[in-house]
Image (spheres, rainbow, N blue to C red):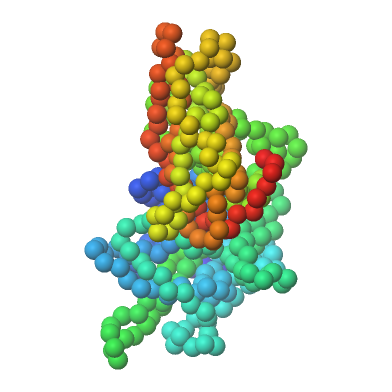
Amino acid sequence: MFAASRAIIVLLLSVTVHAEGLQLIETKAIDGFYIGVASSAFTTNDTPVDDKLIFGVWKTTTNNYAMVYIPTEPEYAYQVELLDTNGTAMPKTRLGEQVGRRFFALDTTFSSEGAQLRRAYATDKPGFPSQYLFFPSKPGHGGRPVYSPNDLFDIKKPGRFTLRIQFQIIVRTGTGKNKTAHIVRFPPLDYPLVKLDTGKAASAAQASPLHLRAGDIQWSEAREGVKVGIRWNTEQFPGNGAIIVYVAQATTYSNNLVDPEADQRFEYALRDADGKPVELTKEGKKYGAALQTSMSRSRRISRQIRLWVNEPYQLAVFRMDDCFELTKAGEYEFEIRLRLLKESGKELLPVIFDPIKRRLRLAPAAKSKEL
């Protein structure tokens, strides 16, 4: 399908790490524009084939922005193929066969009979991508569901794969009567994916808090020999998913750490696209209490944190719908500051981590009584 050679593709497979830990795999710049792809966790590490992918468009020139037009139908927007480690293409499903079917039929006339287009602003500073890949209409659905690569390809065996994607956008230049439009077609981008073993033993290990995909967790800077992190889990929790909090060794000297009471482990906030805080529910107000540094000896011993090297430990979990009064769909910024205690003789000293921020695409809350 793609004319680019494997040698060229290997050169394009590089991860760029931007501010706030955002990781992108990016195309080569064409006409001053480039595209970056990440998983829904905003990382590129060990992305499972059943994860949803997102992308964004940026420009190489500085101090301004440019308006571009993105085809909203996968039939026009991009071409895809999935290769195993031997370079063998995986067969497509019926859905997969629709992606890229009219890739070369895209035109610049902006006709109502042509491809549907969405305006987007390409800036010079990469932020969190907001465009989902793979959303063809599905019979029986009122909206436009988002599909994962696993929905588009018949992947029978576990292993590592490469999703090869070629994007195209429309760019307008000039002003007034001199305005013209042209297609910018990017070279193929290679995005690494992994299909995990779904056998019973493997499934049990992967579900354990001690056997997590590191790419799913966004970590803080280390303090006192440990790091803390969060994972947004939308696969096992309905609605807007749950935030899972982890702690893990960062060095070999993470000793004498104590887990605070559940209501004191962290303080958090959720802000909408305008920066306005989202109101907490009754359940959500249970967290964020002042950190107490007094605890009985028996209680202190029972809450000591014992870690193994390279094995994250689940510290807390809470559902977004249970904690925040979410009334409208949109992009949100979640911020959390995690807290531990450290034994120093008979005293307990606070260990405060830098805030972790994460962009989330959320819908109106669906309440649940059980976790």
Evaluate whether residue 66 shows in this view. yes
Q: Position of residue 244 (x, y in %)?
A: 56, 38
Q: Position of residue 184 (x, y in %)?
A: 40, 74
Q: Position of residue 99 (x, y in %)?
A: 60, 70
Evaluate whether residue 50 shows in this view. no
Does 173 sit above or below residue 337? below
Quarter placement of the N terminus: bottom right
* Total numbered labels: 0
Q: In this orientation, which residue lies closer to the viewer: 6 or 139?
A: 139
Q: Residue furthest right?
A: 200
Q: Residue furthest front?
A: 282
Q: Residue furthest bottom?
A: 177
**Taking 269 as reference, is 101 left or right?**
right
Q: Residue at x 52, y 69 (%)?
A: 78
Q: In this orientation, which residue lies closer to the viewer: 198 or 71?
A: 71
Does 24 sit above or below residue 173? above
Q: Residue at x 72, y 72 (%)?
A: 139
Quarter placement of the C terminus: top right
Q: Residue furthest top?
A: 345
Q: Residue at x 52, y 79 (%)?
A: 116
Q: Residue 353 appears in which quarter of the rendering?
A: top left
Q: Residue at x 62, y 61 (%)?
A: 147
Does 342 sit above or below residue 321? above
